[in-house]
Image (cartoon, grey):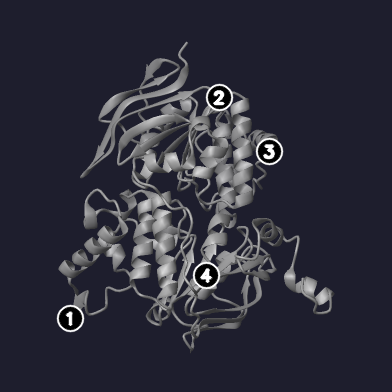
Amino acid sequence: MSEYVIEMLNITKEFPGIKANDNITLQLKKGEVHALLGENGAGKSTLMSVLFGLYQPEAGTIKKDGKVVKINNPNDANALHIGMVHQHFKLVEIFTVLDNIILGAEPNKMGFLQKAEARKKVLELSEKYGLQVDPDAKIEDISVGMQQRVEILKMLYRDNEILIFDEPTAVLTPQEIDELMEIMRNFTKEGKSILFITHKLNEIMAVADRCTVLRKGKYMGTVEIKDTTKEELSRMMVGRDVKFEVDKGEQHLGDVVLDVQNVTVPSKLHSNNAVKDVSFQVRAGEIVCLAGIEGNGQTQFVYALTGLDKMSRGKITLCGHDITKAKIRDRSKLGMSHIPEDRHKHGLVLDFSLEQNMVLQRYWQPEFQKFGFIRNKEVRKYTDRLIEQYDIRSGQGAVTTARSMSGGNQQKAIVAREIDKNPELLVAVQPTRGLDVGAIEYIHKQLVAQRDAGKAVLLVSLELEEVMSVPDRILVMYEGEIVGEFDPKKTTVQELGLYMAGAKNMYRDVEKKGGAEA
């Protein structure tokens, strides 16, 4: 019997204008975690989509347990016990958790759905693997971390043995990432084999046995994790040394740009408020980070701040203008830019071209239109400049459909568009989600450049490394309230973790001590 459960030999996959996979070989051993590392657009997701039957390669062979197999579609993959958790989840938002898990594999007797039987199996699996979910909750009402659990349970429900995780931690909190790493280790102890696509070198070092590196669609090599370092992997991936620390010069504070007073936002899930009486300021020349575990009101606060949702109480002032009830376009005109948490829902029109997406919030400006007609040459020239400046990789350049681009390059496009508007306030929600180390380094430089240019930056992040290295001040949010304010130079990850988990509340502790410092 073959040493490998899966062999992808000399795989080539092309799209218009781009060779996404160029003669790539990947071999997966039984019971191992095999990481697949590469820059945004290096061809990682494409290669895994070939294995899962979503794409057909132009050349190459796939073997399962030493035998050549043909995978025409995901049903063929499932029949071979291959499952995949996609970077952008494949869930029906208005269906329940249970309905999504069994969709396409519904148990039935004489044509009648046997939901009780399915529920029992799902609950047993969630208990066994520590993947607690509410089977009756609707997907649209649960957190992104919970949605990922649903995707994993979908694979387990189908008894898959080869598990593909495409950027599984891009949307998770630090605690959820630790849980997922533990779940992956438990899977391999049971003899399951895991292909793990990621940009995060720490995670590869923590959980993977071997790592295959791709660069610009080509195979760079496979290494044993015990014999390599983060620096070595980043060099293989990017082709140069990457700086992991964020360089920040002296801070020069200016006037208050954003003033948030007593903002309260109702919850759509329960009778409590999602955001409770939140007040803070962001000044010109500083980066303030709103940190917290997902589901503690950050999303609802950002929706209220950017005009995507209404608040029930409070006042928001931007550059001296009351924007509490202002429309989204008016907020944009007054100097607010927004890198949204969900790039598909709020960042891009996926079926528009890249150039159309780049001027979504500016097409009415004189440089892009004349007498109501779009100046296409100017739009093209503008988009080409941003593609060059931000290294946005797209098969057909400015005319590429946004949907066809990799997740990381979609993110780069949004970041480029929002920063290039030259805002007074940049609201950056998870700006480096799904980006490789080279791109993260570049985005962090851009955020610091905004601050140094006298702009205000509100960063919302779950990445503790980012929270500790990028901002000048950290505000921790727990259950809709600001529970602590910190200087990143004077705090620790452990202290932040206690506040993020609700074990401590700076303001409550001060009250208890009669005004003494917590």
Residue at (43% x, 28% y) in the render: 77
> Dot 1 lies on which element?
loop
Say which of marks 1 and 4 sits in front.
4
Instruction: First in sequence, mark 3 or 1: give its number.
Output: 3
Residue linked to disc 4: 303
- Residue 61 in picture, x, y percent from top left: 32, 22
User: Can you tell which mark lies on residue 31?
Assistant: 2
Residue linked to disc 1: 371
Q: Is residue 107 above or below residue 484?
A: above
Instruction: First in sequence, mark 1 or 2: give its number.
Output: 2
User: Can you tell which mark lies on residue 123?
Assistant: 3
> Dot 2 lies on which element?
loop
Looking at numbered disc 4 in the image, what kind of residue is underneath it?
A: Tyr
Looking at numbered disc 2 in the image, what kind of residue is underneath it?
A: Gly
Task: Examine the image and state in which quarter residue 517 appears.
Answer: bottom right
Residue at (55% x, 46% y) in the render: 148
* Residue that extends furthest to the right in the rendered view of this protein: 513
- Residue 483 in picture, x, y percent from top left: 69, 69
Q: Is residue 168 above or below residue 317?
A: above
Say which of marks 2 and 3 sits in front.
2
- Residue 38 in picture, x, y percent from top left: 39, 42
**Can see residue 104?**
yes
Circle 1 packing at 10 Å, graded few (<14), some (14-19), many (20+), is: few
Mark 1 to mark 2 CA distance (whole Å): 64 Å
